[in-house]
Image (cartoon, rainbow, N blue to C red):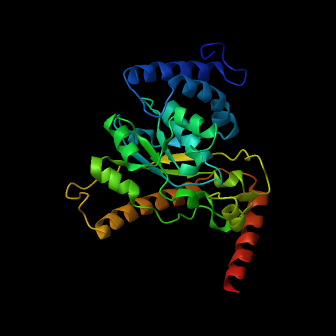
Amino acid sequence: MINEAHHWFLSPEDDQKIREVFKELRVRYKDYKDPWGFNLDLCESTLRKLIPLYRSYFKVRVFGQENVENKPYLVVANHTGQIPLDGMLITIAFAFDISPPRMLRGMVERFLAQMPFLGDLTAQTGAILGDRGNCEYLIDHGESILIFPEGVKGISKNTPDYYKLRPFSQGFYRIALQKKTPILPICVIGAEEMFPFVFHAKKLATMLKMPSLPLSANLIPLPSPIDIYIGKEIIIPEHMSLESTDKEIKENVYHIENTIKHMIVHGLANRRPFFDFIRKPVSKYLIREFRTKKKI
């Protein structure tokens, strides 16, 4: 099924590119044994279905490919968009638009890993439970890991808080210290606009034992153009180790967080227009109302 004629949404050029990408990946993963069920054939099949969305619906652009070397990274990104489509698009970018191609191994929350069907699907397409031992295993085997240090809070933002980073957790940095793995900062612009007007029902989410329950004016993500910026790698200082103080670690995590903040500012300044004539005035109104209510 994988090698049959390209899907009718898939261009011949993209079909050929996918064949070339997975030819390289099969050499890379020839002797790799994955304890979580990673399945390269399923990855290819899934990518064929998603590339038309990546190319034509979200019109993804990738900047900074030259900053990616052929070695393991902790790929650290801002989290946006209410549902984790940003992770999917970053993963496709590293497989499809970066050479040599690689399959990023995304860290997921326990609630997703335990869900019927979705848990198995995400594991087979590369996702892992965000456990330190899992990450160390992958780094030892030359894999790069996609991490959102904001966690669920990163996609649990109401409209007035779009593109405002939540404080980064420090767990990823301790993994980087353990393995002296360089960090690659990533910024995603455009995913917030997929769901432009959102309210999070926190109490209902708690009752349903869900980490987040966004209520949006639209059920299907809008075709907001997505830009992915890849920054220069951040090297772990030689003098630092797992015995470093919390203060030292916090300072380095803040540096990474601040780096991504600056990337967001640059990305927003160069954001492609998307229904700006509606989105901008309504967003300004919502932000004004939100600030007024916070003062009361």
Which quadrant holds the N terminus? top right
The residue closer to the viewer here, 146 or 196, is 146
Which quadrant holds the C terminus? bottom right
The quadrant where residue 125 appears: top right
The residue closer to the viewer here, 39 or 216, is 39
- In the image, taking residue 163 as reference, residue 248 lies left or right, namely left
Q: How many marks?
A: 0
Q: Residue at x 66, y 45 (%)?
A: 225
Q: Residue furthest top?
A: 4
Q: Residue furthest left?
A: 239
Q: Residue furthest bottom?
A: 296
Query: Looking at the picture, does residue 159 appear above or below residue 113?
Result: below
Q: Position of residue 83 (x, y in %)?
A: 65, 50
Q: Position of residue 127 (x, y in %)?
A: 51, 40
Q: Residue at x 62, y 58 (%)?
A: 211
- In the image, taking residue 175 as reference, residue 194 lies left or right, namely right
Query: Looking at the picture, does residue 16 appear above or below residue 260?
Result: above
Q: Residue at x 72, y 25 (%)?
A: 9
Q: Position of residue 204 (x, y in %)?
A: 72, 64
- In the image, taking residue 172 as reference, residue 48 lies left or right, namely right
Q: Position of residue 231 (x, y in %)?
A: 42, 49
Q: Is residue 232 visible?
A: no
Q: Is residue 160 visible?
A: yes
